Image: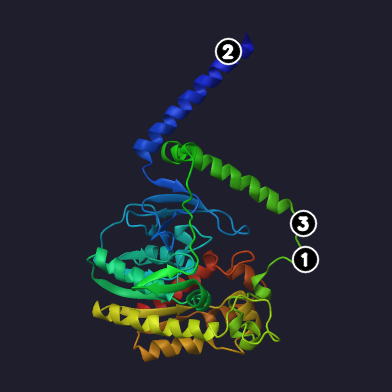
């Protein structure tokens, strides 16, 4: 008898919970929910962020999940209603600008939004974008937004070289992936129904899944040969490793790498060209233009004996009369000299992306060097 009563109460609870979730999903929480908020377009050859999306995102296993909200135009933001202000700032970049590994308030754009109360912040950064895409998304942004823009910041990351060389090419002015990727796979009816009508269940289940994955990762004995960016990152190693050894031109010297013959030079040339084109677009809007650069863990460890990224970006800035380069190399190098735990202070665990402290250091320097009035 007791068991029968328990079953009845259990089924009543489940029905009541499902009813509450249906109401929550359709009348209260109107955002879509997903694990990454990406959407592929142009037959899988281009991707962007979904409009009005929420994700408890986790790209890298060593980084804790973090919340991502996108607005009605598919831009990452705080998730709160935007307040209309007179001045507007646009940020372009890849995962560093997007803020991988951090909630919005701990990204450098989010920190700037809190400190610069008179400005609207528009973050156009998306992981694995590069200058060809920066130019395109900025053009589309201008087409769809009639705004007076005060400043544009472009974070040039070391990955931009390989992405320009290997990942992106242009077709009629539209950036196109060299390899199609379909993230939006055909979902089952139940999967679609759950994400559209049982959003509360999806959010709760994802949090539980990440929690147990975190326990599993912490319980695994640390491997001696685990990937540590501070010991070397193939993508960014062109600043300190011989280019002939990285590229496939000479098979006798070649190391295991993804670089193609003359790939480094190709990537660098494309960056210079696309930034020049982007600056012209920005100047037509009478806006200030700034480049941002920062070192990776292995850059600080091994230096720039083969290629000086700072000099390269400074020359681009000078050649195009930009308003300045926000250079974090000296700041991070100085911290490295002062603190033995510099790696943990600046970078996320076993990763190249910035911690809250690293992002705050960057935001402070942006304010110091580009808001001097």
Q: CA distance from mark 1 to mark 3?
A: 9 Å
Q: CA distance from mark 2 to mark 1?
A: 55 Å
Whichever of callouts 2 and 1 sits on the residue coming sooner in the sequence is 2
Rendered-image quadrant of the C terminus:
bottom left
In front here: 94 or 335?
94
Which of the 4 image quadrants contains residue 224?
Answer: bottom right
Give the side of residue 82 with respect to residue 348, left or right. Answer: left
The answer to whether any part of residue 372 appears in the image is no
**Disc 1 target residue:** 224
Residue 281 image point, x, y percent: 29, 78
Residue 221 image point, x, y percent: 77, 56
Which of the 4 image quadrants contains residue 314?
Answer: bottom left
In front here: 131 or 93?
131
The answer to whether any part of residue 305 appears in the image is yes
Rendered-image quadrant of the N terminus:
top right
Query: Badge 2: how crowded within 10 Å, few (<14), some, or many (20+)?
Result: few
Residue 206 image point, x, y percent: 55, 44
Q: Where is 113 relative to 13, above or below? A: below
Whichever of callouts 2 and 3 sits on the residue coming sooner in the sequence is 2
Q: Are marks 2 and 1 in contact (CB under 8 Å)?
A: no
Q: Where is 98 relative to 304, above or below? A: above
Circle 2: element type: helix
Give the color scheme: rainbow, by chain, secondary structure or one colour.
Answer: rainbow
**Disc 2 target residue:** 5
Q: CA distance from mark 2 to mark 3?
A: 46 Å
Residue at the image point whose x is 53% and y is 20% from the top = 11
Residue at the image point whose x is 35% and y is 85% from the top = 322
Query: Badge 3: how crowded within 10 Å, few (<14), some, or many (20+)?
Result: few
Report the disc number at residue 221: 3
């Amino acid at each position: 008898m007791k068991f029968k009563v328990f079953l009845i109460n259990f089924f009543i609870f489940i029905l009541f919970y499902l009813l509450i979730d249906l109401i929550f999903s359709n009348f209260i929480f109107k955002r879509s929910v997903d694990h990454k908020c990406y959407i592929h377009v142009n037959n899988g050859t281009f991707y962007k962020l979904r409009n009005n999306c929420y994700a408890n995102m986790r790209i890298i296993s060593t980084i804790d999940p973090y919340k991502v909200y996108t607005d009605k135009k598919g831009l990452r933001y705080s998730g709160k209603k935007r307040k209309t202000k007179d001045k507007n700032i646009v940020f372009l970049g890849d995962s560093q600008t997007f803020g991988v590994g951090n909630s919005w308030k701990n990204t450098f754009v989010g920190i700037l939004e809190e400190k610069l109360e008179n400005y609207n912040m528009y973050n156009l950064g998306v992981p694995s974008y590069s200058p060809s895409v920066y130019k395109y998304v900025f053009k589309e942004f201008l087409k769809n937004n009639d705004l007076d823009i005060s400043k544009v910041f472009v974070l040039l990351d070391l990955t931009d070289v390989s992405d320009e060389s290997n990942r992106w090419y242009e077709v009629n002015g539209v950036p196109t992936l060299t390899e199609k990727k379909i993230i939006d796979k055909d979902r089952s009816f139940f999967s679609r129904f759950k994400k559209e009508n049982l959003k509360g269940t999806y959010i709760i289940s994802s949090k539980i899944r990440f929690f147990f994955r975190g326990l599993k990762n912490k319980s695994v004995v640390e491997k001696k040969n685990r990937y540590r960016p501070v010991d070397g990152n193939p993508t960014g190693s062109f600043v300190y490793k011989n280019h002939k050894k990285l590229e496939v031109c000479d098979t006798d010297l070649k190391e295991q790498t993804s670089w193609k013959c003359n790939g480094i030079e190709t990537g660098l040339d494309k960056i210079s060209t696309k930034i020049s084109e982007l600056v012209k677009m920005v100047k037509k809007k009478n806006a200030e233009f700034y480049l941002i650069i920062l070192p990776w863990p292995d850059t600080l460890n091994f230096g720039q004996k083969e290629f000086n990224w700072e000099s390269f970006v400074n020359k681009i800035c000078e050649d195009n009369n930009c308003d300045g380069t926000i250079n974090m190399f000296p700041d991070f190098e100085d911290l490295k000299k002062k603190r033995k735990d510099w790696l943990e202070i600046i970078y996320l665990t076993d990763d190249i992306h910035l911690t809250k402290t690293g992002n705050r250091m960057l935001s402070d320097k942006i304010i110091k060097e580009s808001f001097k009035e």
